[in-house]
Image (spheres, grey):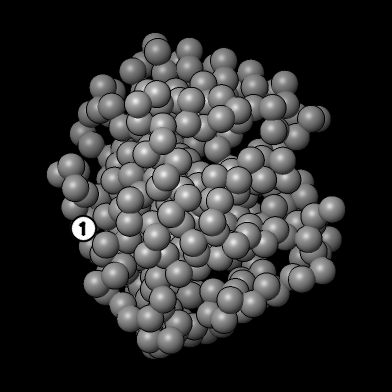
Amino acid sequence: MAEYSQTQERSGHRAHDGLQPVKGREITLRCRDGVTLRGHVWSGRADPLCGTVIVNPATGVRARYYHYFARFLAEHGFVVLTYDYRGIGLSRPNRLAGCGFRWRDWGERDFDAALDFADKIGGGPVLVVGHSIGGFLPGFATNAKRIDRMLTVGAQYAYWRDYAARERLRLFLKWHLAMPALTALFGYFPGERLGWLEDLPAGVANEWSFRRARMELSYPARERQAILNNFSAVTAPILAITVADDEFATVAAIRRALRYYRHAPTTEVLLSPANLGVDRLGHFDLFHARHATGFWIDALLWLRDGINPWPDKAPL
């Protein structure tokens, strides 16, 4: 699996093709519960017909990992919003231990604020690019019915039985035994010092570690129907990308997540490294700068026109 690394993250700050790159403008998002998030808006030759794209990161990945991708979209006519969830990167509080932030908050409150902001900064449709948990979180937001179209990459919620069989035991030991033990010891998950990912709030780490086959079972019984209703209210078409050598986001994992979007038209695509002319992809690689002249160009067809550029790549 291609691991998340700060080396790849820094690659997002290079210009390409000899052009002066679009620069991100720093912004602040204020959530309904008063929590402040920080991010960037990217806008070049904005075309109102393209619309506004919200980029939702994977768990424990800073928004800056997606900056080159955001710049690419801005150079092709989109207005783009990148932001760090509460507890991560630029939105990390001074003290992470005891902050109480959860995965659910990232969708119900943080993405909610991002969507409100996106409505105000651009014209045209509101689009979402969601990586890993970032493609599942929109369903928690009460305003997610305002999304016009979604592109998800490896979007799942980390139920351990969905991991690739060849790596299931290793991943279970890492994320469902070691992570909760270290979280209990430190009061947050010290992912950065381990070189695994960014540090995580305890609530986020524990939701990952103890996630059950049914997502809603992670929450009190009295709240479950409201959560399911939010997901059901989403009607935006979803193009869901699965990568063949992704050990986290298998076809089974993607489908488990997509079933919550009951009223959203969904199209699944399974891409192999060979399809893109590389040896490996894994969970993170499609947002690396090396795909700017391949996968990213193809993805524009869905984001701009709602056309699946890979009609012959549906999983069996």
Residue 49 rendering spot, x and y as whole percentages? 43, 86
Residue 297, by quadrant, is bottom right
Residue 199 place in picture, x, y as percent: 40, 32
Residue 9 or 124: which is nearer the viewer? 124
Name the residue at 27% across, 74% down.
121
Of all residues, the one furthest to the left in this rendering is: 34
Image-based side of 159 in relation to 78, left or right: right
Residue at screen point 50% across, 74% down:
72
Q: Nearer the viewer, residue 203 or 186?
A: 203
Point 58% across, 34% down: residue: 158
Tag 1 residue:
28
Residue 222, visible in the rendered structure: yes
The foreground one among 244 and 88 is 244
The total of numbered circles placed on residues is 1
Alpha-carbon neighbours of circle 1 within 10 Å: few (<14), some, or many (≥20)?
Answer: some
Which image quarter is the N terminus in? top right
Q: Is residue 203 above or below residue 232?
A: above
As helix, strand or loop, the secondary structure at mark 1 comes to strand
Q: Nearer the viewer, residue 284 or 128?
A: 128
Q: Which x, y percent locates residue 56?
A: 44, 54
Q: Picture coordinates of residue 205 (x, y %)?
A: 44, 27
Residue at 33 percent across and 56 percent down: it is 143
Where 58 falls versus 11 (above or below)?
above
- Decide: is 292 above or below 257: below
Res. 2 visible in picture: no
208 with respect to 86 (left or right): right
Q: Amino acid at mark 1?
A: Thr
